[in-house]
Image (tube, rainbow, N blue to C red):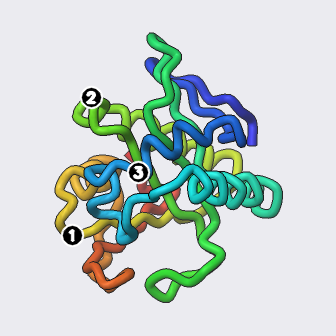
Amino acid sequence: MKLPIFTERLILRKLTEDDVDNIFLLDSNPDVMKYVGIPPVKSKDESARMLENIINQYKINGTGRLAVIEKETDRFIGWSGIKLLADEVNGFKNVYELGYRFLPEFWGKGYATESALASLNLGFNQLNAEKIYAYADVGNASSNHILKKLGFENKGNFIDEGDICNWYELEKDNRK
């Protein structure tokens, strides 16, 4: 992965162990975690384990979620990126998946779309993916809207961690 990635308003970089406070702030927020399928984290130790997992994904799979930094303020606002689904989800395994998560004060500003476009470019151009997948809780109207706006095709529903999710697919040749 060639990093960092610069967009008009954002910087996407690898997460490091120094991001533990940022990840804790993000993943301990009930509003952020509402549609994730897991409860908010309760300790920085949980966030440190999550970061260790992401850092290992960089080493093992050559990709993973990336910290998203707002250029104007140099502030961590969330994460976005492509990861390899090493564990089966909806019958799929060892495929690339787009995800993103942002602090609530940065919702509605187009940052998810902007960072997702940069992540998709990384997936298709650096990782040479032919298809990238994504999924979102059916109740998460914003995330479902973003995925459709990015050109993802809804391939139906499945149950993940007890929640009903939409499963999306985007082929390299069908990007917007």
In front: label 2 or label 3: 3
Q: Is residue 25 above or below residue 3?
A: below
Left or right of residue 121: residue 147:
left
Q: Secondary structure at mark 2?
A: loop
- Residue 89, compared with residue 73, is above or below; it is below
Q: Left or right: 30 with respect to 3? A: left
| Mark before the other along the chain sequence, 2 or 1 | 2
Name the element at disc 1: loop
| Distance Cα–Cα, label 2 vs label 1 | 21 Å
Q: Residue flagged by tag 2: what amino acid is it?
A: Lys
* Quarter of the rendering containing residue 21: top right
Q: Residues within 10 Å of mark 3 (few under 14, many from 20)?
A: some
Residue sitting at x 71%, y 42%: 17
Name the residue that disc number 1 marks: 138
Q: Which residue is mark 2?
A: 109
Q: Answer left or right for 160 relative to 64.
A: left
